[in-house]
Image (tube, rainbow, N blue to C red):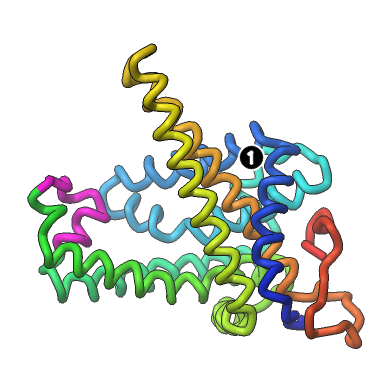
Amino acid sequence: MKLLIVPASTGLQWVKLGFATFRRQPLALTSLFFLYVMAISLLGAIPVVGLILALSLPPALSLAMMVAASEAAHGRRPTPALLLVAFRSGRERMQSMLTLCAMYTVGIVLIMLASALVDGGQFANVYMGNLRLTEDLATSPDLQAAMWLSMGLYLCFSLLFWHAPGLVHWHQVPPVKACFFSLVACVRNIGAFTVFGLGWMGAFLLAGLALTLLMGLLVPLTNTAVASGVMVTVALGLATVFFTSVVFSFRDCFAPPDADDGANEAGAQAPAAPAPDLPE
């Protein structure tokens, strides 16, 4: 495994590739992401065991979207079976993924415990669905402080798991090392990831502006249910494109296992599309 360093402008390319790949299989990718969200929601509604499973699944489901994006990039239609790809790729990789999911759960719990030190657990209970978010609660300084603390901690935490599922699946890297290499890759390519984040902020802001204008036209002509449906559809589509773009950041940060040892590490550019099973 070889870490690649890419120019900051590559981050914008990842965003563009996400949209380009989504256009190839919009319905299949959106359906897969919808099943992803539904699985998390349904599990989260089950007390204790279901909640633990819901907290643990994001790494496995993130891998599913990466593999689906790789399939779509080659013109193949992703299927719902990809949701289980993390657990159907051999016993060793399945065990590594289960360990990674357990590590992710522990991290989320620790973040929630840290937020509880600020507001006595109110934000954690809202996040877990145990407490309804009221207007008074939302404006509480303690809850807002806990929310910002959690967001900051999660941003740092997410760097550990950004590439980890792909490293476990495609490079057979042990979970702890996968998290370490993921963090190093994100830090070493901080310019590209900053541009990537800014690009997605711009995309969501533009979508929000367009939706605001569209709602101004739709609401007088239809009803709020139709307007809400449009908003949910657009949000679901954008979230799908975001997860579709993640695989390209992985592809450009790590050389494939059979890459030439003499590959150019500084400013290395990846091919236009990832390989069927491994982003190259």
- In which image quadrant can residue 15 be found? bottom right
Q: Is residue 158 magenta?
A: no
Name the spot of residue 199 as percent of width and height, x first.
57, 59
- In which image quadrant can residue 228 be found? top left
Residue located farthest toward the left when viewing the structure as drawn: 136
Q: Is residue 140 above or below residue 181?
A: above
Left or right, residue 1 beside residue 98: right
What's the residue at 16%, 76% (across, down)? 117
Name the spot of residue 4 as percent of width and height, x first.
75, 80
What's the residue at 44%, 42% (across, down)? 208
Q: Which residue is mark 1?
A: 29
Q: Is residue 271 above or below residue 61?
A: below
Question: Is residue 92 shown to the viewer in this render?
Answer: no
Q: Is residue 81 above or below residue 113?
A: above
What's the residue at 49%, 41% (across, down)? 207
Question: Is residue 31 shown to the viewer in this render?
Answer: yes
Q: Is residue 125 magenta?
A: yes
Decide which of 233, 3 is in the foreground and name it: 233
Name the spot of residue 202 as percent of width and height, x first.
52, 54
Dot 1: element: helix
Left or right, residue 245 beside residue 121: right
The three-letter code of the residue at mark 1 reads Leu
Residue located farthest toward the top when viewing the structure as drawn: 221
Decide which of 44, 184 is in the foreground and name it: 184
Q: Which residues are magenta?
A: 122-135
Left or right, residue 185 beside residue 225: right
Classify the position of the N terminus by image quarter.
Answer: bottom right
What's the residue at 12%, 67% (across, down)? 142
Q: Residues within 10 Å of mark 1 (few under 14, many from 20)?
A: many
Decide which of 40, 141 is in the foreground and name it: 141
